[in-house]
Image: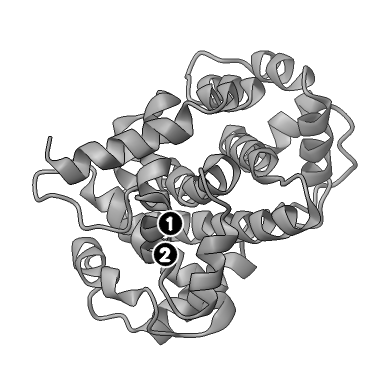
Amino acid sequence: MNQVASSNASAVEGILSRTNELAVLPHVVHKVLELTASDDASAHDVESAIAIDPGFTSRLLVLANSAAFGLPRRVTSIREAVMFLGYRTVRSAALTVGVFDIFVGKTDRDSLRRREWWRHSVDTAICARYLAKSTEKVPLEDAYTSGLLHLIGKMLLDKYGNKPYDDVQRMVDQGTADYVAETQVYGLDHSEVAAAAAAKWNLPAALQSGLRYLEPAEPDDPFAALRACTTVSTMMAIWAMNGPQQEGSECLTWALERLGLGALSMVDLGAEGRRAISEAEFRI
């Protein structure tokens, strides 16, 4: 391991070792992900896993009764919600709710910043699933999960870094790219922290690669398409909300080529992102 890699590994471990909260995602999220990925799990099994978490239960029922689904009658039980929504939607909802809970801050300023990151994460996840479906190069749920978690490193730096994230924000406000500012302040950027956290959470190797979306994948990386999908989808989400802009687009070339999207412009991608977000089946 070279000196830079060793220094980065040390910085990551310093952040991840500061709290036991980083050992796992919320238990109910893990359980729902496990069950909805199994062919043998029944609706009763999923219901039992969800029922232990009143917060998730209430959000799932709100989702099932939202106008997005237009169900013929009110859904009043977890089992009905699971049956009407299906495992894929329940799985996405579990991830979204679980990640939101991690992003909540303790102060108004923390909450505002982290909620903005969370909102962008959800939009990126929606765009990633849209890309996965349209290109057929990445499993839909892997794409959604990588998009949803791609900014988790920011929250971890903000909450557990050895310096306040305000130091990064000041540099960003002056025109420095966020990952450059993070490296200067913390010695590493949020994508490196996210990948390390994914490893600590025992998430699949595909996600660990996908979360390193700020750098091109190695030619022999079997998960290069997932990483490319995350790279493109985060820019789609930004352009969908703020219009085309050059900032951050320097990392796009390899990703667009990997997905066979090299002919699309920033305007095209922004428009596709807006369409995907507006048509999403839910946006908690």
Residue at (31% x, 58% y) in the render: 214
The answer, for residue 146, to whether it is visible in the render is yes
**How many other residues sit within 10 Å of disc 1, few (<14), some (14-19) or many (≥20)?**
some
The x and y percentages for residue 168 are: 51, 63
Residue at (83% x, 26% y) in the render: 54
The x and y percentages for residue 204 are: 35, 29
Residue to which mark 1 is pinned: 185
Dot 1 and dot 2 residues touching (CB under 8 Å): yes
The x and y percentages for residue 4 are: 19, 46
Mark 1: which secondary structure?
A: helix
Which residue is more in the foreground, 22 or 184? Answer: 184
Picture quadrant where residue 92 is located: top right
Query: Which quarter of the figure is the N terminus placed in?
Result: top left
Residue at (90% x, 41% y) in the render: 74
233 with respect to 58 (left or right)? left
**Kind of residue at badge 1:** Val
Which residue is more in the foreground, 113 or 58? Answer: 113
Please name which of the two marks, 1 or 2, marks the residue nearer to the observer: 1
Mark 2: which secondary structure?
A: helix
Question: Residue 13 bears which disc, if any?
Answer: none
Above-or-below relation of 4 to 176? above
Query: How many marks overall?
Result: 2
Residue to which mark 2 is pinned: 181
Above-or-below relation of 123 to 244? above
8 with respect to 25 (left or right)? left
